[in-house]
């Protein structure tokens, strides 16, 4: 399935994370065998490295702008594609990670705390990020009531909202919009060119104690749920207002 989300932002991300109760294995043979299996599926994933925090990463070359990545953190497995052309490409990679993790990483249904499906966007803007967010999302809300005061400037507008999508509150949706602007930058009117306003929309499923967690089944359900909510709610009510507020300042 193709999409046009990239036309509304500078970078678009579709990620999956499996959060585990126990630490993941960190022995050499296990890690290399897992990443080698992924590389057999996508030979262009040739950039393997260990970060300073001890996390292991396998990525494609990021120069073209669209690239795959898979991470192994202490108690989290991450998978995604930056600026994907087809969403199904991301889902296929995520499914393979979920299929491999019980056999190659020892992650079974008891070990899974939760599973996340995340849509994310970056909006490049050299200016007051908080002002853009306030204008796009708060100008007609009670939270914008102080912005009409003399010398008032937006300084702390990075909203986060968490809602339940199920009666037992184990299926949740989280929306956050993050400003990278500091009070120092606003005070001196000097803004970093490389910073971006970031938006994250995550559908998380927690393991239910009375059920065996089926990661693949949950993933399919979460992808459907997240895709529908992102298209019907996040795009018209958050993404488009942000994009419009930025375009009016350029």
Image: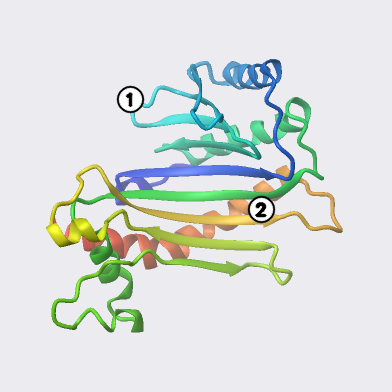
Residue 18: percent from the left, percent from the top? 65, 43
Which residue sits at x=24%, y=42%?
194
Quarter of the rendering containing residue 173:
bottom right
Q: Residue 63 got which mark?
A: 1
Q: Residue 27 got which mark?
A: none
Q: Is residue 17 left or right of residue 148?
A: right
Q: Residue furthest right?
A: 210
Kind of element beneath mark 1: loop
Marks 1/2: CA–CA distance:
33 Å
Q: Earlier in the sequence, mark 1 or mark 2?
A: 1
Residue 145 can be seen, yes or no? yes
Kind of element beneath mark 2: helix
Which residue sits at x=43%, y=29%?
67
Quarter of the rendering containing residue 204:
bottom right
Residue 91: percent from the left, percent from the top? 57, 39
Q: Quadrant of the C terminus?
A: bottom left
Residue 249 can be seen, yes or no? no
Disc 1 crowd rating (10 Å Cα; few below 14, some 14-19, many 20+) is: few
Pick the front one: 9 or 103: 103
Residue position for label 2: 221
Pick the front one: 224 or 244: 244
Disc 2 crowd rating (10 Å Cα; few below 14, some 14-19, many 20+) is: few
Q: Are marks 1 and 2 in contact (CB under 8 Å)?
A: no
Which residue sits at x=33%, y=67%?
157
Instruction: Work out whether 81 lies above or below 27.
Output: below
Residue 222: percent from the left, percent from the top? 63, 53
Q: Is residue 105 left or right of residue 239?
A: right
Which residue sits at x=34%, y=45%?
6
Residue 199: percent from the left, percent from the top? 40, 55
Instruction: Work out whether 105 lies above or below 86.
Output: above
* Total numbered circles: 2
């Amino acid at each position: 399935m193709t999409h046009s989300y990239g036309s509304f932002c500078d970078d678009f991300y579709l990620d999956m994370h499996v959060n585990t109760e126990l630490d993941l294995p960190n022995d050499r043979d296990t890690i290399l065998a897992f990443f080698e299996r992924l590389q057999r599926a996508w030979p262009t994933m040739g950039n393997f490295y260990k970060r300073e925090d001890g996390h292991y990463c396998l990525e494609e070359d990021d120069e073209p702008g669209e690239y795959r990545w898979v991470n192994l953190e202490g108690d989290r497995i991450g998978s995604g594609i930056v600026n994907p052309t087809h969403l199904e490409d991301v889902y296929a990679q995520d499914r393979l990670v979920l299929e491999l993790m019980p056999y190659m990483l020892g992650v079974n249904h008891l070990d899974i705390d939760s599973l996340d499906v995340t849509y994310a966007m970056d909006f490049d803007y050299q200016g007051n990020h908080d002002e853009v967010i306030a204008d796009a999302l708060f100008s007609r809300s009670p939270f914008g009531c102080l912005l009409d005061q003399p010398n008032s400037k937006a300084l702390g507008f990075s909203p986060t909202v968490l809602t339940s999508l199920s009666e037992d509150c184990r299926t949740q949706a989280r929306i956050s919009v993050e400003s990278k602007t500091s009070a120092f930058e606003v005070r001196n009117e000097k803004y970093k060119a490389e910073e971006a306003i970031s938006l994250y929309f995550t559908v998380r499923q927690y393991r239910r104690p009375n059920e065996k967690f089926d990661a693949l089944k949950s993933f399919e359900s979460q992808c459907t749920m997240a895709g529908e909510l992102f298209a019907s709610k996040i795009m018209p009510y958050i993404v488009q207002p942000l994009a419009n507020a930025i375009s009016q300042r350029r």
